[in-house]
Image: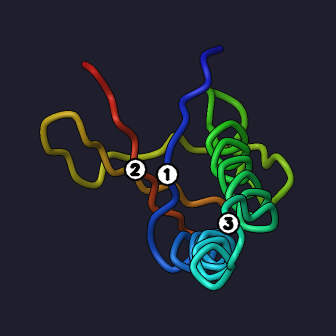
């Protein structure tokens, strides 16, 4: 059972990554507005942003039985993701979890 990690695309990915990048922009704003050489709040916000990106990558995966998003519990998937688009090493998959839940996933593969 190998985990296949991905990046979330579509409306769900746009909303999720918008909130993650808010942390990065806060870090940059605090860094540019600060007067000290070492601006600890900016460094802390930057580290939180990096931790959120690592957490997102490690907790978004699918395998033969489960589909996991960083903001949802593990869902037992009845269908495998279907190839939607492919170009070189970039693969875009579509997975339908429920009747109304459809996710677009970007996977970088070295096939």
- For disc 3, the neighbor class at 10 Å (few under 14, some 14 to 19, many from 20) is few
Q: Residue at x 63, y 50 (%)?
A: 53
In this view, the mark in front (3 or 1):
1
Point out which mark residue 7 bears: 1
Give the quarter of the image for residue 77: top right
Q: Residues within 10 Å of mark 1 (few under 14, many from 20)?
A: some
Along the viewing direction, whichever of 79 and 38 lies nearer the viewer: 38
Which x, y percent locates residue 73? 86, 53
Residues packed near mark 2 inside 10 Å, few (<14), some (14 to 19) or many (20 plus): some
Query: On the image, numbered disc 2 is attached to which residue?
Result: 106
Contact (Cβ within 8 Å) of mark 1 with mark 2: yes
- Outermost top residue: 1
Q: Which mark is residue 98?
A: 3
User: Disc 1 or 2, which lies upstream in sequence?
Assistant: 1
Does residue 83 appear in the picture of this structure?
yes
Kindly report the distance in space between the C-alpha atoms of the residues bearing marks 1 and 2. 5 Å
Residue at the image point whose x is 33% and y is 51% from the top: 92
User: In the picture, residue 4 is in which quadrant?
Assistant: top right
The percent position of residue 54, horizontal first and vertical second, equals 66, 42
Q: Earlier in the sequence, mark 3 or mark 2?
A: 3
Q: Is residue 37 above or below residue 111?
A: below
């Amino acid at each position: 059972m190998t985990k296949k990690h991905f990046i979330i695309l579509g409306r769900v990915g746009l909303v999720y990554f918008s909130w993650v990048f808010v942390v990065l922009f806060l870090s940059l704003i605090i860094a540019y507005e600060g007067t000290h050489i070492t601006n600890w709040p900016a460094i802390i916000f930057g580290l939180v942003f990096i931790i959120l990106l690592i957490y997102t990558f490690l907790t978004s995966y699918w395998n033969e039985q489960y589909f996991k998003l960083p903001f949802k519990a593990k869902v037992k998937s009845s269908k495998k993701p279907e190839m939607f688009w492919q170009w070189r090493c970039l693969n875009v998959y579509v997975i339908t979890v429920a009747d109304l839940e459809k996710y677009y996933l970007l996977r970088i593969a070295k096939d």
